[in-house]
């Protein structure tokens, strides 16, 4: 069963993948940009701030409203559909954190 992607789950993933190349700070130099894949539709989204500017790490605020399932009291996105997975975009292709880590280690 798929897990809902939240700010907390992103933080947990960052701790888990630290040191492996599976976080933004460690794979940027290899051309990876933080992004998301909607497994339901196949759509790929680069990570963006709410204003549309590129975000240097996984930010939920720039995802389209139809992917959002919960917002906090200030309107910030705190959870998105279970079909959304965080990963990276490089050369127009989506990479999971695991795939990006393997590319950085090869």
Image: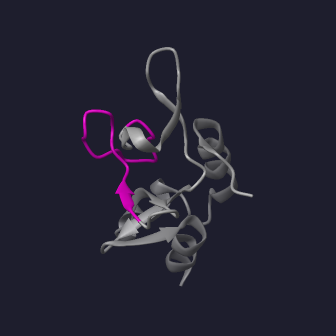
Closer to the camera in the image, 38 or 93:
38
User: In percent of the image, x 38 and y 71: which residue is there?
Assistant: 30
User: Is 2 colored magenta in this rendering?
Assistant: no
x then y, percent, for residue 3: 69, 50
User: Is 58 colored magenta in this rendering?
Assistant: yes
Q: Is residue 3 above or below residue 76?
A: below
User: In percent of the image, x 37 and y 47: which residue is there?
Assistant: 56
Quadrant the N terminus occupies: bottom right
The secondary structure making up most of the magenta span is loop
User: In percent of the image, x 55 and y 75: which residue is there?
Assistant: 99
x then y, percent, for residue 59: 44, 41
Which stretch did the figure color magenta? Answer: 43-61
User: In percent of the image, x 46 and y 54: which residue is there?
Assistant: 25
x then y, percent, for residue 105: 56, 78
Quadrant of residue 33 within the rendered picture: bottom left
Closer to the camera in the image, 23 or 63:
63
Quadrant of residue 48 within the rendered picture: top left
């Amino acid at each position: 069963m798929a897990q809902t992607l939240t700010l907390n789950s992103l933080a947990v993933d960052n701790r888990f993948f630290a040191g492996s190349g599976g976080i933004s700070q460690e794979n940027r130099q290899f051309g990876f940009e933080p992004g998301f894949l909607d497994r339901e539709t196949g759509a790929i989204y680069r990570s963006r701030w709410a204003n549309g500017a590129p975000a240097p790490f996984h930010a939920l605020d720039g995802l389209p409203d139809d992917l959002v399932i919960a917002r906090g009291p200030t309107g910030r996105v705190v959870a998105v559909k279970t079909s959304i997975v965080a990963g990276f975009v490089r050369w127009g292709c989506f990479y999971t954190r695991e795939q990006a880590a393997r590319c950085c280690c090869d």
